[in-house]
Image: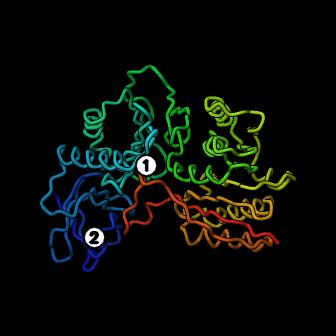
């Protein structure tokens, strides 16, 4: 195995457990293709473990293990996937068949995502290292899970940075279906991995949907950027007096209506509207008791950060103005570059400009099937705030 040597003192990040080492920390590179597994050595030559190496990217090393004598062969990955399965068997609630099975670095698979929907798995590969062992990982998934189908959705800017082209499509599909109906805390949702956003559903919001639904009884609820109606179904089933779901996507709205119907919810009291959320928040005169803001990522790079901050401030400001006195606002950001502290400051600024006093009731994040390594807080992309807008 080839080795990569770090500059003196740069091994500290490995001791702390962070899985990334940037190119500027490297003293001596290995002459190997992108994605090759290498030994990582400190400045004095000590063995620090093994990592995927990509000499062409800013994140040059992605740690696989800090065990110095490990060989990441098929058996190694088999054990690691089995460990991820056992965690989900422990933490996933009953009546739930949609969850994240592998969450990249947090489960020891840098750049590899696997979401499970009933008997289908949807995979996403974003690093050259995982790309090299793709066939091995697919084989192990088939052995341990025996899915009826595996769909691949490997695309996006991260993959491009790694020198990889996009790849989407069925790896195999023994079911002849493109849609699945899954259960989440007993509620039903239709999933289409081919045409849906992300891998087909925003399963990271499961716990937040459960919480917000429990607060909606007898309330008028506005679900902004509603996608396929996840929050709407929970609120309606928990007794919301009325819900309005707003999304600009015709296809997402049609799926939301289907999800409302399969859960036996009255369409008369729970309407879905195709509209621009920014325009709706500014122009519509109706007031609500509970508003949910779950927009797509406004910032996909650091260059977009200022524009994203303006977007988050705008929707939060106008949402606060549309709340009844004492109403609740559940607001989220899934932008990697908008960290928790910055998001809180943006929402605080929105409240000040809206002339509103607010109470922070709870900070929100993804479910436990989306774990985060403590030293790698960058892996926690979803953040949220549950606020009460004070009367007067």
Alpha-carbon span between mark 2 and mark 1: 24 Å
In the figure, 237 relative to 283: above or below? above
Looking at the image, residue 200 sits to the left or right of residue 102; the answer is right
Image position of 167 with respect to 173: above or below: below
User: Dot 2 corresponds to which residue?
Assistant: 14
The numbered disc on residue 159 is: 1
Q: Is residue 264 above or below residue 352?
A: above
Q: Position of residue 74 (x, y in %)?
A: 19, 43
User: In the rendered image, which quarter contains the N terminus?
Assistant: bottom left
Return the residue nearer the eye: 59 or 233.
Answer: 233
> Mark 2 or mark 1: which comes first in sequence?
2
Q: Is residue 333 left or right of residue 348?
A: left
> Along the line of sight, which residue is nearer the eye, 328 or 294?
328
Residue located 34% across and 64% down the image: 20
**Disc ID at residue 222:** none
Q: Quadrant of residue 196?
A: top right
| Foreground: disc 2 or disc 1 | 2
Q: Secondary structure at mark 1?
A: helix
Residue 77 in the image: x percent, y percent? 23, 46
- List x then y, in percent, for residue 265: 68, 34
């Amino acid at each position: 195995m080839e080795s990569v040597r770090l500059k003196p003192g740069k091994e500290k990040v490995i001791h702390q457990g962070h899985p990334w080492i940037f190119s500027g920390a490297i003293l001596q590179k290995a002459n190997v293709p992108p994605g090759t597994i290498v030994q990582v050595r400190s400045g004095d030559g000590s063995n620090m473990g093994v990592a995927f190496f990509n000499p062409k990217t800013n994140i040059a090393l992605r740690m696989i293990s800090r065990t110095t004598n490990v060989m990441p062969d098929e058996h190694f990955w088999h054990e690691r996937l089995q460990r991820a399965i056992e965690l989900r068997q422990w933490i996933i609630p009953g009546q739930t068949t949609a969850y994240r099975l592998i969450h990249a670095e947090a489960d020891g698979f840098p750049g590899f995502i696997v979401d499970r929907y009933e008997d289908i798995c949807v995979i996403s590969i974003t690093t050259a290292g995982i790309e090299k062992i793709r066939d091995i990982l697919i084989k192990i998934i088939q052995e341990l899970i025996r899915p009826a189908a595996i769909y691949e959705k490997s695309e996006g800017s991260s993959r491009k940075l790694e020198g990889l082209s996009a790849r989407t499509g069925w790896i195999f599909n023994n079911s002849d279906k493109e849609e699945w109906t899954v259960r989440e805390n007993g509620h039903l949702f239709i999933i289409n991995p081919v045409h849906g956003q992300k891998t087909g559903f925003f399963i990271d919001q499961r716990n937040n949907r459960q919480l917000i639904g429990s607060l909606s009884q007898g309330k008028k609820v506005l679900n902004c950027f509603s996608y396929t109606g996840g929050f709407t179904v929970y609120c309606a089933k928990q007794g919301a007096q009325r819900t309005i779901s707003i999304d600009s996507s015709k296809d997402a709205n049609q799926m939301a209506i289907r999800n409302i119907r399969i859960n036996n919810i009255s369409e008369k009291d729970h309407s879905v509207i195709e509209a621009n959320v920014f325009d709706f928040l500014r122009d519509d005169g109706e007031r609500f008791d509970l508003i949910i803001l779950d927009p797509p990522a406004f910032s996909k790079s650091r260059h977009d950060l200022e524009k994203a901050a303006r977007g988050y401030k705008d929707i939060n400001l106008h949402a606060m103005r549309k709340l009844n006195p004492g109403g609740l606002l559940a607001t989220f950001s899934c932008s990697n570059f908008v960290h928790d502290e910055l998001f809180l400051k943006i929402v605080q600024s929105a409240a000040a400009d809206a002339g509103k006093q607010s109470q922070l009731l709870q900070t929100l994040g993804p479910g436990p099937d989306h774990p985060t390594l403590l030293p790698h807080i960058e892996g926690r992309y979803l953040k949220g705030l549950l606020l009460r807008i004070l009367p007067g």
